Image (cartoon, coloured by chain):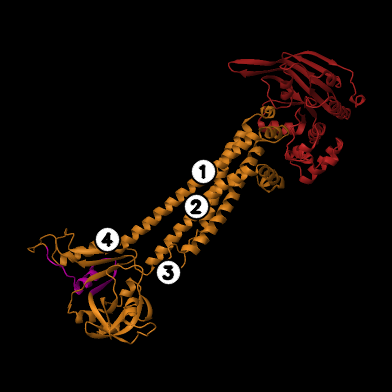
Chain colours: A orange, B red
Amino acid sequence: MIKFLFDRDTWQELYDSIRKNKLRTLVTIFGVGFGIFLLIVLLGSARGMENSFNRLFGDFATNTVFIWGQSTSKPFKGFQEGRRVRLTLSDAKRVEENIPGVEFVVPRSQQVSKVDRGFLSGSFQIGGDYPLLDEVEKKKLIRGRFINQNDMQLKRKVAVISEDVYKQLFEKDENAIGEYIIINNINFKVVGVFKVSNINMGPPINLHIPFTTFQQIYNQAGRIGWMVITAKPEFNIVQVEKDSKLLLKNIHKIHPDDRRAFGSANAGKEFGKVTGFLTGMQFLTWFVGIATLIAGVFAIGNILLITVKERTKEIGLRRAIGATPLEIKSQIILEAVVLCLIASFIGIIFGGFVLILINYAWGQGDSAALVNPSVSIAVVLFALTLLIILGTLIGLIPAFKATSVKPIEALREE
Amino acid sequence: MLKISDLHKSYAIGDTSLHVLKGIDLSVEEGEMVAIMGSSGSGKSTLLNIIGMLDVADSGEYILDGLPIDNLTEKKAAVYRNKFLGFIFQSFNLINYKNALENVALPLYYQGLKRKKRQELGMFHLGKVGLTDWAHHLPKELSGGQKQRVAIARALAANPKLLLADEPTGALDTKTSYEIMEFIQQLNDEGKTILMVTHEEDIANMCKRIVRLRDGVIMEDKKVTQVRASQYV
């Protein structure tokens, strides 16, 4: 077998046969080549989409749930339904201490306020936040810093403002750090400017001020707007959400089956949906790609069958002068495999080029739809192996057809 | 060299079966040149095909050079054909996309010879049929006679014990036919055993022995005085 593959004459025979049937060769190569081309482009694009989703979620702890208080919908322990539920700092603390799998809980508060600077003013969402927020949704700071522990302890009047706020309150190219703005008639020093991230869970916050400062200036005492619970990676965030809600219902004397008392947004669940969608798309891609490949390989088999029919006489003669059936079969199978391989090389190269073009067209910049569309070598090798196997299998049909006719009948055929 | 006894062969045609060979006994010595004659349907081609191991008999014995030919698998038949037999066909059966030399060297390829050796032997045999200058021409660039000479060179290439010719002059005009016969006679002179199917009397008379078949049996088997083809050329 090895000798057969490394024999120059084997390839000479192959070359002759291919050269003799140029059109046939082109058509089949197109069929299979298109199949693998499609597979490469589709898989590459799917990967690009996955990459872009990952980039979007990259700044965000995905195993996170947001919980806030609403109104009860069931009477419980003497309380009427419709009671307003407000979360408190101690709730956050108890969730952090009692729920298994919780990594940290970040309490947050938020309020709309008028912000002034000189003659410029605007109405913005003010968030009272812990420095820990940076762990949940990474703040992209253009200048300065985020709120720190000192700010918290000293209840400093400092603010981290969004790019939009900066644009509205400051002149172009003006340095905002160290400047003062007026929130709720109190002077705040700007310590940082951040860029709004792609993914935002909860209301978009324009200005972050220390949580402690917020509580004081808005008279919140222990009340908080909502809490952000981040689970450890190995824990299921959906379960953590359930456990936390049950604990909170217990604390606030709410019926355990009350579905409306707490509102929540589960980032993990949303992320899971996107991941599921991506997986589904990849499956579809493989399905379409491989179906096209199989169709192409069948075309090769079909056309080889026709050539075998055309060459019946030649094959009969070869057998009359001493070719064994195995030699005839190997030659035909090799022809099928080589055609498949040539086709796949062409398909892979063209597919690669198209992915490069896609990268140029849609893969550039921050809001790119497809980031780095590519296929891994493993996928390419897998596709090649699959093609070799399919090529061999499909080559068997014409190969057996070629040797099923007796040489004498083959020779007689005109 | 070759011994056949009580050979039977029938073909199934629909529900009935056609008894083509009804007990053939034939023995051929080394160096003989035998013409098998008969009208179409007499079974002459079937007999040649069985001798050529392209077809299998239903019953009877066939011994080639002391080797009983039976229970042939396709592979075994291929090896025997390659080692013992050379074929010459009426329609030449050259491979049209291979040049004369490649056609001649093809049996050697299936013998597993090295490329260089094949080229050498191929050229030698092409030289024997006088076509050295045509070695790199495709069959379509050759005349009918030249094609048959290439086919003869191919039959000789594997140095077979027995040459089988199925109407070797059937597709050629009289003059070319005699030229080809002259070649075949020369081969016989050199000691090759030749078996030839023909339905032309003049060609048959250029052999040394004529076997006449009718309806699947040997009617007549006689030695003849060989007419030399060279006197017509």
The amino acid type found where label 4 is placed reads Gln
**Can you tell which quarter of the image residue A396 is in?**
top right
Circles 3 and 4: CB atoms closer than 8 Å: no
The residue under the point 48% across, 63% down is A361
Front label number (3 vs 2): 3
Q: Which residue is mark 2?
A: A39
Q: Which residue is mark 4?
A: A239
Query: Callout 3: helix, strand or loop?
Result: loop
The kind of residue tagged 3 is Asp
Q: Are marks 1 and 2 in contact (CB under 8 Å)?
A: no
- Rendered position, B225 above or below A23: above
Looking at the picture, tell me which residue is in the foreground, A30 or A61.
A30
Instruction: Work out how far the residue at label 3 is from the one at label 2, CA to CA, in angstroms.
Output: 27 Å
Mark 1–mark 2 distance (CA, rounded to whole Å): 13 Å
Decide if residue A393 is in sight here: no
First in residue order: circle 1 vs circle 2:
2
